[in-house]
Amino acid sequence: MKTLLSMPWGYLSIFVYLKDEDAKKEFVADLQAQGYKLPENFRRNDEICHSYYKILPNKTVRRAQGWAINMLLKALPINEVYNNHLLIDYAHFKSLDDYLEE
């Protein structure tokens, strides 16, 4: 199974894009299963409200907030490294896991 800990942490800033509610639910379930620390304001009424998150190597997750980071993330190519940033489409990341198991 692919885990977030298998990401190349050495030189990258890793961000996750959650495009729909299914991806958000799967993301939260995977984070909890892998022992990540979720911020207190991560969920509102048991729903994730935002689409972009930064994953840190110390097993914490932060919401990517602010106009500058949102402009950066919207300009990044998805699933490609660009200027030491990696933006992962989480649904695509998980579908690769299904593909590799077959």
Image: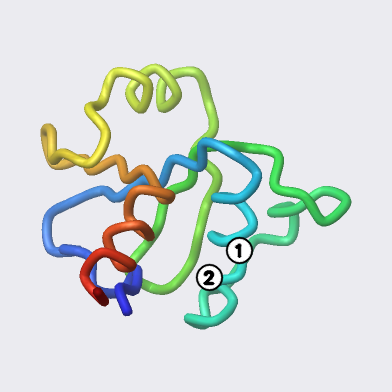
* Image mark for residue 67: none
Q: Tell me if 84 is positioned left or right of 46 in this view.
A: left
Residue depicted at 12% across the width and 55% down the height: 11
Q: Amino acid at mark 2?
A: Leu
Q: For this rendering, which residue is in front, 102 or 60?
A: 102
Pointer 2: residues within 10 angstroms few (<14), some, or many (20+)?
A: some
Q: Toward the viewer: 32 or 19?
A: 19
How many labels sit on residues?
A: 2
Residue indicated by mark 1: 28
Q: Secondary structure at mark 2?
A: helix
Image quadrant occupied by the N terminus = bottom left
Q: Quick check: marks 2 and 1 in contact, CB under 8 Å?
A: yes
Instruction: State the quadrant of the C terminus.
Output: bottom left
The residue type indicated by label 1 comes to: Val
- Kindly identify which residue carries mark 2: 31
Residue at left offset 25%, top offset 64%: 99
On screen, residue 33 above or below 80:
below
Residue 15, image x, y percentages = 36, 45
